Amino acid sequence: MLFSVRRTGLMALLIIGFATALPASAQSPQYDLLKAVDKADLVELNELLRKGVSPDTRTRSDRVPAILIAAHAGNAGVVKLLLDHDANPNISDNRGQTALMARSVVGDTAMITMLLSYGADPNRADIAQETALMKAVRGRKFKAAQALIEAGADPNVQDLTGKTALEYAKISRSRRFIRLLQDAGATY
């Protein structure tokens, strides 16, 4: 009996020691993909995607998808590579934020246009019911707002507080935004 307990304990120590001695890359291909996205390593990322690792891989802790990590970093090359391998352009984090929303906040019209061309929904809302258009208006990113409206963003959507993009434009007293939104059919 004592021999059995010692042997089992020894085996457990060997297994734990072996597992912790493994390099991080041996943990999982999903981990490797997220690391490649974070480092903007297009060669490694392309190799992992060709091996079949999902482009919609998420972080374990906060469930942030790879495309959103790349979007927050402003890395258009990584975002395009993920989209070329069928990443979902509308995948969101736990707060409902998408890559399109992330780039709308900073006014990155080139990436906004790219995401829209891959099927990103300009009317998708986060948990506060804010759309990419609202985020562009609140961030005073006029060209981003224009691109979203041209792609069919609805200027009459209300967030959880009941405000629309037009109301945010009125709060900021921006005649340019007010005119843009009214021309797009905003009524309140």
Image (tube, helix red, strand yellow):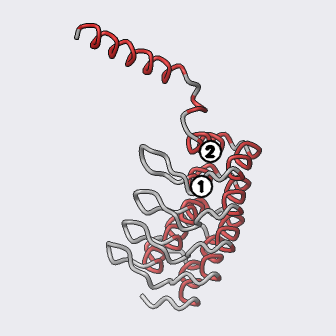
Q: Which sits in the foreground, 14 or 161?
A: 14
Q: Quadrant of the C terminus?
A: bottom left
Determine which of the numbered discs, if any, sits on residue 33 in the image.
2
Residue 54 is tagged as 1
| Residue type, numbered disc 2 | Leu
SS assignment at label 2: helix
**Left of 128 or right of it: where is 50?**
right
- Residue at 54 percent across and 64 percent down: it is 101
Q: Residue at x 72, y 42 (%)?
A: 44
Q: Where in the figure is residue 180, as x and y percent of width and height? A: 59, 83
The crowd level at tag 2 (other Cα within 10 Å; few <14, some 14-19, many 20+) is many
Q: Is residue 45 left or right of residue 182?
A: right
Q: Position of residue 32 (x, y in %)?
A: 61, 40
Q: Are marks 2 and 1 in contact (CB under 8 Å)?
A: yes
Mark 1: amino acid: Ser
When asked about the image quadrant of residue 161, the answer is bottom left
Other-residue count near label 1 (Cα within 10 Å), few / some / many at <14 / 14–19 / ≥20:
some
